[in-house]
Image (cartoon, helix red, strand yellow):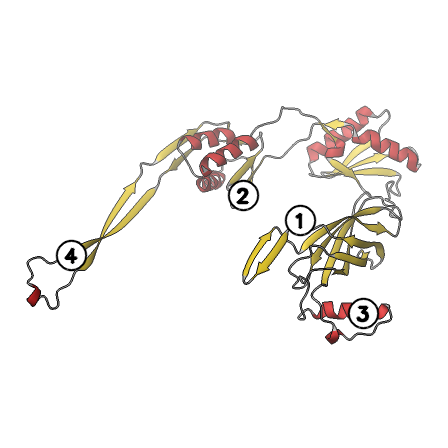
Amino acid sequence: MKKSLLYMVLGAVLAVSPAGAAVRIKDLARFDGVREQPVIGYGLVVGLSGTGDSQRSVATLQSVSNMLREFGLTVPPYAVSSRNVAAVIVTADLPGAVRSGDRFDVNVAAMGDARSLAGGTLLMTPLMANDKVAWAMAQGPLAVGGYKFEQRGTSAQKNFPTAGTIPAGAIAQRTLEPTLVKNSGSLELLLDEPDYTTATRMAAAINSELAGGSASAIDSGRVRIALPGRDPAGAVALMSRIESITVDPDVAARVVVNERTGTVVSGGDVYLSAVTVTHGDLRVSIKERFAISQPEGVILEDSQGVRTVAVPEATVRVNEDEAKSVSLDKGATISDLVSALRAIKVTSRDVIAILQGIKRAGALHAELVIQ
């Protein structure tokens, strides 16, 4: 069953898309200056039903004491005794362009020994970037996609109840405006997968689509477009037109292998030189059984020291299967190799080992990535 599933997966991932399929520039690159800003904060989640941090979490006790002090209550940390509170880390990504008052989602994760955050509410937490400036404030009830129940040493758990999200739980306190136009008066496209051929094709497509366009590939991962003016509105309109231009990307030959799951993913442009693969198994089977030895013809009066004995008997069999050979002609693809290996019933682990061997032999003309 596992072997059949492996080949079903291989058959799906090896399917090749039509040659020359054009892709939008929006799906291949992004404009420099438009990026998300990660923010992080430390806060408290309250309202837990006895599943919060224990007395061993000193940070939680000190945080509760500090919070109460802000409301005019002086309670020393050692006097705080509640498992309805948990110290958490709050993380989020500010959008590339955000205005003061915009809302976005946040992730909340326990940092102490809390058992579950289900049913909790995050108190007001400032979210800071690496400049130590509070860019947003987060607060609200948590949505936890899991649970954990314990009773007398028996527990039942689903997913991870110590982490959750707050949809639209953060409010931006500052405006983040991206810098689209460089000091040189140009826009720059950054390729998601740097490639000299793709960058050259992208620049040529922009020049062909835009009258008087002056795009040029600076390196394998960057295309520069000169602007006639520095009007931000004109730059946004030009960016919209550029994003919709289609390009035929060039993809490097690559085979990705996941040893944990036995999955092999290959592009359609991966070819093999003439190669022969020989595969054989040595199987050793050991079976043990017990024979009962019962003495016969013994008189009961003289049976002292006589007893029934279980005697172990072992049978060892060694079967060495005949080596199976697969030959592939020059120009064969990974799909051809997998089909041939399927014919001789090769396991997923053996497929990975065979691919590594073909790569070492110099017959696999692609980068082999082992995950």
Looking at the picture, how far across and down is residue 171, in whole percent?
A: 84, 50
Q: Are marks 4 and 1 in contact (CB under 8 Å)?
A: no
Near mark 2 (Cα within 10 A), the count class, few <14, some 14-19 or many ≥20, is some
Proximity of marks 2 and 1: CB atoms separated by less than 8 Å: no
Residue 258, label in figure: 2
Count of marks overlaid on the render: 4
The image shows residue 295, relative to residue 178, as above or below, that is below
Judging depth in this view, the residue of 204 and 246 nearest the camera is 246
Can the viewer see residue 234 in this picture? yes
Crowd tier of the residue under label 4, counting other residues whose Cα lies within 10 Å: few below 14, some 14–19, many 20 or above = few
The Cα–Cα distance between marks 1 and 3, rounded to whole angstroms, is 30 Å
Q: What residue does disc 4 label? A: 293
- Precedes in sequence: disc 3 or disc 4: 3
For this view, does 10 lie left or right of residue 77?
left
- The amino acid at mark 4 is Ser
Q: How far apart are marks 2 and 1 (CA)?
A: 28 Å
Mark 3 and mark 4 residues within 8 Å of each other at the beta carbon = no
| Element type at mark 2 | strand
Residue 66, disc: 3
Mark closer to the observer (2, 1): 1
* Viewer-nearest residue: 160 or 129: 160
Which amino acid type is shown beneath numbered disc 3? Asn
Amino acid type, residue under disc 2 in the picture:
Asn
The nearer-to-camera label among 1 and 3 is 1
* Image: 13 above or below 92: above
